[in-house]
Amino acid sequence: MAKKCLVIGAETLSRVVDKNDRDSMIYSDGAGAAIIEKSNQAGAILSHISATHSYEEANFLFFGPSYDTSQDSDVNYIKMYGRKIYEFALTHVPLAMKECLDDSGVTIDNVKKILIHQANEKMDEAIVKRFYELYDLEMPDGIMPMNIAQLGNSSVATIPTLLDMIRDGKIENQSITKRDVIIFASVGAGMNINAIVYRV
């Protein structure tokens, strides 16, 4: 008999994540999109990088039964090897961000904001700190806006959603103006890494 996987809307989201799992994640329903077009105006993607680590890392996120053995064993929940993902992200994402920035021709002191996948604030801060350490610098205050406390983790959709909130003035003490240089960075199932350097 096939296992039942619960992939459902936010109204029953508590059934997607196993409350008995110490690695449970904050999930939310969400979607984000960015429309890219050719233009003669200022502003452009200056560089980008994508990488897939799908050998040993492919199953860092997976479906599995509840850790409460009294629960229905045929129901699978979203699971992760939290420590492995944390270590993977801290190892690979800062290096991808650095490679992307170095390829852009922009110096790190010109980076106004880093919009990173809103997965875990502690992990995101550690990633950005390690990125700055690659340049022998300290992470500047206010460089990394966050909205996970308000919206949860909607995977890579968190990045365009965060950008929209900043542009609409919905994130306190955060702003983006024309000609600002922004780094977008994400890490997720696969394991996949993406980084983009963008001039507004």
Image (cartoon, grey):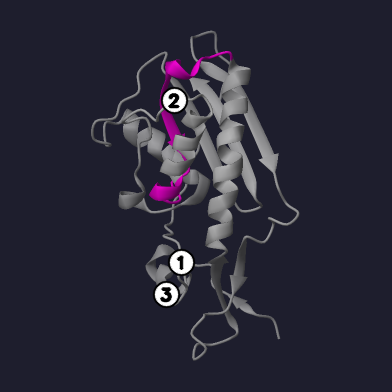
Which residues fall within the magenta stretch?
105-123
Earlier residue among tags 3 and 2: 3
Q: Residue at x 49, y 31 (%)?
A: 133
Callouts 3 and 1 close, C-beta under 8 Å: yes
| Towards the viewer: 34 or 142 | 142
Give SS at disc 3: loop
Q: Is residue 96 above or below residue 89?
A: above
Residue under label 2: 137
Picture quarter with the N terminus: bottom right
Picture quarter with the C terminus: top left
Q: CA distance from mark 3 to mark 1?
A: 7 Å
Question: Label 3 is placed on what type of residue?
Answer: Lys
Q: Residue furthest front?
A: 136
Q: Residue furthest right?
A: 55
Q: Is residue 172 above or below residue 148?
A: above
Horizontal relation, residue 21 to residue 152: left or right: right
**Nearest-to-viewer mark from 3 and 2:** 2
Q: CA distance from mark 3 to mark 2?
A: 39 Å
Magenta span contains residue 75:
no
Residue under label 1: 24
Question: Label 2 is placed on what type of residue?
Answer: Leu
Question: Label 1 is placed on what type of residue?
Answer: Ser
Q: Residue at x 65, y 50 (%)?
A: 191
Give SS at disc 2: loop
Q: Position of residue 120 (x, y in %)?
A: 43, 51
Label placed on residue 19: 3
Q: Position of residue 71 (x, y in %)?
A: 50, 87
